[in-house]
Image (cartoon, rainbow, N blue to C red):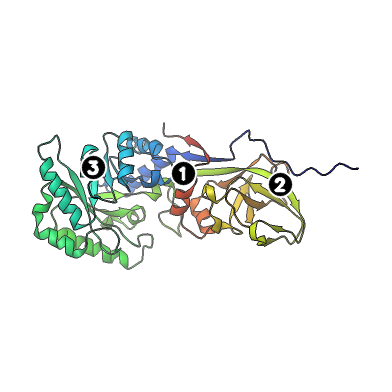
Amino acid sequence: MPPSKSPPSRSKAAAPDAILEIDLGAIAGNYRRMRQMVRPQVEVSAVIKADAYGLGMARVGPVLAKAGCKLFFVATLDEGLALRKILPKSGIAVLEGLMPKTEALFAQARLIPVLNEFGQVEAWNKFGRKFSGKRYKLKAILHLDTGMARLGLSRGEWLKLAEHPRLLEGFHLAAIMSHLACSDEPNHAKNPEQLAIFRSALSVLPKAPASLSSSSAIYLGPDYHFQIVRPGAALYGINPIPGQPNPVKPVVRLKAKILQVRGVDAGETVGYGATHLMNRPSRVATIAVGYADGWLRSGSDRGSAAISGQRVPVIGRISMDLLTLDVTGIDQRLACAGAYVDLLDGTHGVDEAAEEAGTIGYEFLTLLGKRHARIYRGGA
């Protein structure tokens, strides 16, 4: 009896299935780029929420501090407490604001709550009056809603606050901020509309440094800069001016291992749901990355990768741990089990991969999974 055909072999686990390279030097360079975009007297803070957009707050925070950043924004109290252990002397503001019964935690860690509604202002003022006489005075940032209907004091609330300035006496007002809804669309009418509302609010509130610009808004020009800007996505390589050449440096590269390459005949299907029908004899490579690694399922049959600079399409559905590529025509010495393909690189980054998946670079970057082996470069 002739020997049975052995199944295609998987590579040995001698190297990581996927490697995410993070260029800390590029993050520092992008921060310096933001400083060049504004007047010297404008403070450039850094948004480092969501574990520095998924890239590791513990590694990114010190690099930005060394680059000159003195004020950091995080989303939650837990993030603020974690960052305080990493950066004991930096200013740290918490965007979600002052949740009930957290005043003492904020004070002990010297965190700055971003006050988003009138009740938070009252609570922090009351706590601050009791806290007076301690080693330092508490700080806070007022967040005004100028047109997003999300977090922030409404017009009625900030007018009420303007009539009762004593509610701000229990703490130092470190800044007044708002957030633009359409800053990535430079010609959108909402931008000057929110700018006018913000200026109107500043005219009746106590004097304090003002902040309106996140990454994209910095590119709207000096009228939007005020005294503090808050870049986030641009620091991590996401294009702050969609539709135009990216002015910031790419930060991440992702490569993943080929587990198997097999021949597939015309008329056969690939992947779950049999959604991809091969119209010719082909070679299909199975890659060790899936949606559990942040490679979105919505990129099925529309994403791509590169092998030695040659782009190859994703075919079939992306599954939890695997995706499949059509590597027909690629040199078999390059497309073989154990070799790596480039999913993100200097020419095809998170913005391009996100567009293929029908989303934005912000989501794509923050979803890159923890299973990747990480290599940090630069920023020492």
Task: Select label 2 or label 1 by which is in front.
Answer: 2
Reading the image, the residue beneath label 3 is 106
- Any part of residue 200 in sight: yes
Label 2 to label 3: alpha-carbon separation: 54 Å
Picture coordinates of residue 58, whole percent (x, y): 38, 36
Q: Residue at x 39, y 50 (%)?
A: 233
Q: Residue at x 67, y 61 (%)?
A: 274
Label 1 to label 3: alpha-carbon separation: 32 Å
Does dot 2 land on a helix, a strand or a loop?
Answer: strand
- Return the mark for residue 261: 2
Picture coordinates of residue 138, whole percent (x, y): 17, 42
Quarter of the image that includes the C terminus: top left
In the image, farthest residue toward the right: 1
Disc 3 residue type? Phe
- The correct choice, above or below, for 320 with respect to 87 in the image is below
Tell me if 306 is positioned left or right of 196 in this view: right
Reading the image, the residue beneath label 1 is 251
